Image: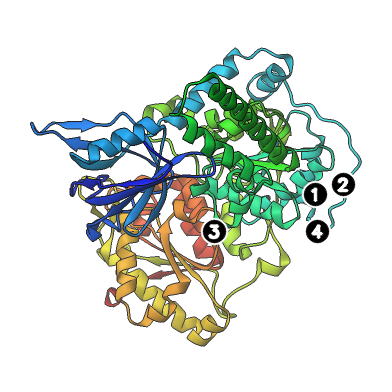
Amino acid sequence: MAGSSGKADIKIQSSAIPGIRYSVEPVEWHRNPFDHLILTVRFTSTEDWGNDEFEPGKTVRFFYKKDDGSIHEFPHQCYIDSVAPGSMGLRVIGQNAVQSILDSGRVHLLGLRLGVDATSYQVMKSALQEVIRRDDEDFVRLRETLLGPLQPRSRQLPHVSCPWLNSSQSDAVQHVLEARDVAIVHGPPGTGKTTTLVEAVIETLQRENQVLVTAPSNVAVDWISEQLMRRGVNVLRVGNPVRISDEMLDCSYERRYAAHPDYAELWGIRKRLRELASGSKSEANANYLSKLRYRRTELEIKIHAEIFNEARVVACTLIGSANQVMAGRRFATLFIDEAAQALEPACWNAILRCSKVVLSGDYQQLPPTVKSPQAASDGLATTLMQRVATAKPSCVSLLTIQYRMNRAIMNFSSRWFYNGLLKADPQVADRLLSPIDRPITWVDTATCGFSEQGEGISSSKSNPHEARLLIHTLRDYIDFVGPSRVDDELTDFGIITPYKAQARLIRRLLKMNYFLKAYRRSITVNTVDGFQGQERDVIMISMVRDNDNGTIGFLRDLRRMNVAITRAKMKLIIIGNTQTLSRHRFYREFIDYVQENGEIVECSTDSV
């Protein structure tokens, strides 16, 4: 490749196969602040613009079809750097790879398909191997405390005054500070887990120069990072910039690297080195090149060190803690938020860098995603947080005061999952949208003759009659509360269902309903997983399952139902067949609870 930028005509063949991109022409390339090569491909087929399978951070590979019909795939793995209507930026490793792709593009119709990125699995595997192999005294003690017979150690510290926290939150912060090995902050729905964890981080920074804050997902890392920033903490966000929220981009390692006062000189040296790479091989030129390379390395080390040294909190995903910019970094304390959704091997990847770990989350809500049934049964579905909490209960601080739900919505979850220890703050305990409303309503479809449907070869289910009933029920409820009150109080609604097929169906019906058009922006439809960590004034749950043999499938995962029923602030409406569901003890007791603390109404077939 002759220079740092240029153009080539590349055409990618059309295909209707999922995960394949269509026709593309001209491709431009440039270098980003880290000297990475970015190829921009522009698509000529507008039908492919909405293909949302191709997301920033995913891997792709180029291929072309030979004359004999066989497919030749390039060995070079590319990463999607950015996506825009009609175009996509790809990060390609190595000038030779770029040149090979461009040369082939001049004589072949190229294709582009999604690849499989095994980086996360490799990182987790390497972490487990290191956990087994490592034998220094401090780490062995931490490992045996988390997994073995050693009991957690603690120390006595003066009581920290946090008058803006409630008593259980203050106790949790104190517990974190006094722990020497491990502490767990168990935060049920609406109890202010993030508020508590942020305070624990800030108090820890009164005693330590820098801490590591992680979570299993970029969204979770960004959320707690934003809360820390608002408290005036200098946060360094490490990770792929395309997966970092807009609010956190200015704190990203890449942005701070490019904004460093010495970066302009470094960029100039890199450019000069590229220009001289194919020049004279004389001794004088070689010496000049050596000096430039030395200065380049000196500047890279200086910029890197200063960026890290200025940060009080380094924030990244659990897998991201293996990022090359983290090489050699160690921290006294590690905070893992949403630890109940984190795979244990991913947790160990971060723990290897630290002497003390604080796990925060709720293992009575959504578990981590484990696609392999064998891996799940072999123990991968059990999180490190759950394992430690069960074996070492002295580690756990339970937050007990919740600020989200009406007490009637809260109490069943409290009894079933949290030993009845949750209490509703007085400001929310009796809150309703209407003074004549009941906090929970179950619309029973047992006598309506509804039936569930399977979706093709997938396991997703839908129930069209129940979906239409839900739309009708939502309209009736808005009429009951009063449209003016709904508007004045900016009431928001959440519709939750365990099945993607039902969620798609409900979205279509919402778009077709003229009355609900005015409220569409305040209505969110999603699966249970999509509602984790969220809340709405009114929550409606479509249970979907309706059969004579009591088969409930996905609904057997009670942690998911815990998430679903605890998203509501003032009103919870469940639509489902009580006869099908009551064969399971959890739902039988929940139906009895609704009968005592809310209302069960029979559906009318006229509503469907």
The image position of residue 204, as x and y in percent, is 79, 41
Q: CA distance from mark 4 to mark 2?
A: 12 Å
Amino acid type at circle 2 is Val
Instruction: Give residue 170's mark.
Output: 1
Mark 3 is surrounded, within 10 Å at the Cα level, by few (under 14), some (14 to 19) or many (20 or more) other residues, namely some
Q: CA distance from mark 4 to mark 1?
A: 9 Å
Instruction: Give residue 2's mark.
Output: none
Disc 2 to disc 1: CB gap under 8 Å: yes
Is residue 204 placed above or below 128 in the rendered structure?
A: below
Residue beneath label 4, please?
164
Disc 4 to disc 3: CB gap under 8 Å: no
Instruction: Give residue 534's mark.
Output: 3
Taking the image as shown, residue 419 lies to the left or right of residue 100, namely: right
Give the label, 2 or 1, closer to the camera: 2
The image position of residue 233, as x and y in percent, is 74, 50
Is residue 161 placed above or below 449 in the rendered structure?
A: above
Q: CA distance from mark 4 to mark 3?
A: 23 Å
Who is closer to the viewer here, 252 or 140? Answer: 252
Q: CA distance from mark 3 to mark 2?
A: 30 Å
Amino acid type at circle 1 is Ser
Residue beneath label 2, please?
160
Is residue 188 placed above or below 133 in the rendered structure?
A: below
Mark 1 is surrounded, within 10 Å at the Cα level, by few (under 14), some (14 to 19) or many (20 or more) other residues, namely many
Mark 4 is surrounded, within 10 Å at the Cα level, by few (under 14), some (14 to 19) or many (20 or more) other residues, namely few
Q: CA distance from mark 1 to mark 3?
A: 24 Å
